Image (cartoon, helix red, strand yellow):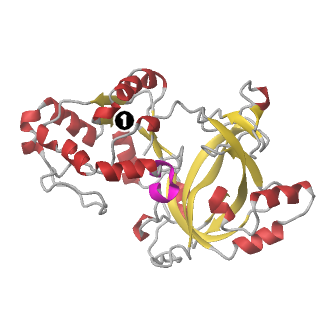
Amino acid sequence: MLMTLWNEFEHDEGSKIADMISTAPLIIALRVKVTTFNTLSFTTRYSSGILISPPLPDDLSLRQWFSLNKEEIRNLLDAKTYNDANCLLPPPNEEDIKAISNFQASFPVQKAAWVQGTVKLAYGFSKYWTTACANCHKIVNADIDWIIHCPSCKQQSEVELRARIPIIITDASSSIHCIISGEDAEKLIEFTPLQLKQAQEDGFQIDTELNDALKKYTVVCFLKSYETPFQGQLQRKNTVIKAYTAAELSDRPLPLELPENTQVSSALGSSSARHAETSSKDQLFTPSTKLLLEEIAGASSYKDSQTSATSGAKRSLEFPEDLPADTDPKQPTKAPEEFAKEPAKSYGPPANIKDSPAKKPKAKED
């Protein structure tokens, strides 16, 4: 996964990591945030901390793990799996799918979740396409024949057309309005982004055709819910980060109907959930972070403080038989290009590209 270093972390820790990246340094990031930038990634915040090559016990065996899997890790980096939504968000297990009503009620405690339901068009929109950075897919106000310096990913990039369709997902508990875009949207409709743009410019109404195409599908989606200012008030919106159709999950069918004993939580969640949230906010460190710091401070008592590991998904990487139980082998060593520069704000109006000095016509290919 990508980890974005902001502000002083970019200049201080980022520079140190870049200088020693060839030695495969061990990096421990504390209190980082999980974000849907680039599908799914980590980002530092003001309270984060990054430890570079800390004095951990030799028997942690992470270096041995890295040596055993160098080729596989390099293949993952070359394939840019850290940007691949199919790798970052594979189909969920049945128990990971939430009822839409529960997901709506859990905001803002939980802002992202897997949901499942039937699809139809959300009427009332006249534009079903947008222009976006070809690198990070953030919306930009630019023509498709431009080369821009993206205000979000800070990279020079082409501008591409992307489908952007408002939909309603419905399950047995409730319905939710959301936006689905890009390749996930295109596989549900019978139009290309260019056709959507031309239809709008020519004044053709294609709402019926879009709805007829969409209502054929049952989807499993990873949704993100967020609030954005609109006319002086916060407006809640939902975005599909990744979607799978029932046909794509034919080898692992998921139930559409909710169990009879499904309970819809209140807007603030259960009392136990509220208690857990309050307790976690009062803690200076999470239990796992506290344990990690204790292990670093007292390396000699490392083996005595080991706890049994929870079972995890099987991976294709190889692990030594003596790998400690609480070693997490799922995060490969980062390559230099993975430490992306600070992105612009994730939400809000796009930058005015026409005022940017970096704009220049796209070179034509022979």
Question: Is 132 left, or right, of 203 in this rendering?
Answer: left
Q: Nearer the viewer, residue 94 or 101?
A: 94
Position in image of residue 93 (x %, y %):
41, 68
Question: Is 110 left, or right, of 343 in this rendering?
Answer: left
For the residue marked with disc 1, what is the amino acid? Arg
Would you say residue 350 is visible in this rendering? Answer: no
Quadrant assignment, res 280: top left
Quadrant assignment, res 104: bottom right
* Location of residue 32 with respect to 200 vertically, above or below: above
Q: Nearer the viewer, residue 3 or 305?
A: 3
Question: Is 278 left, or right, of 163 in this rendering?
Answer: left
Position in image of residue 16 (x %, y %):
35, 24
Q: Find the magenta span and give its range.
A: 81-88
* Location of residue 117 with respect to 295 vertically, above or below: below
Q: Residue at x 57, y 63 (%)?
A: 243
Position in image of residue 30 (x %, y %):
33, 34
Q: Can residue 85 be found in the magenta stretch?
A: yes
Classified by dominant secondary structure, the portion drawn in magenta counts as: helix
Name the residue beneath numbered marker 1.
31
- Dot 1: element: loop
Would you say residue 49 is visible in this rendering? Answer: yes
Q: Can residue 304 be found in the magenta stretch?
A: no
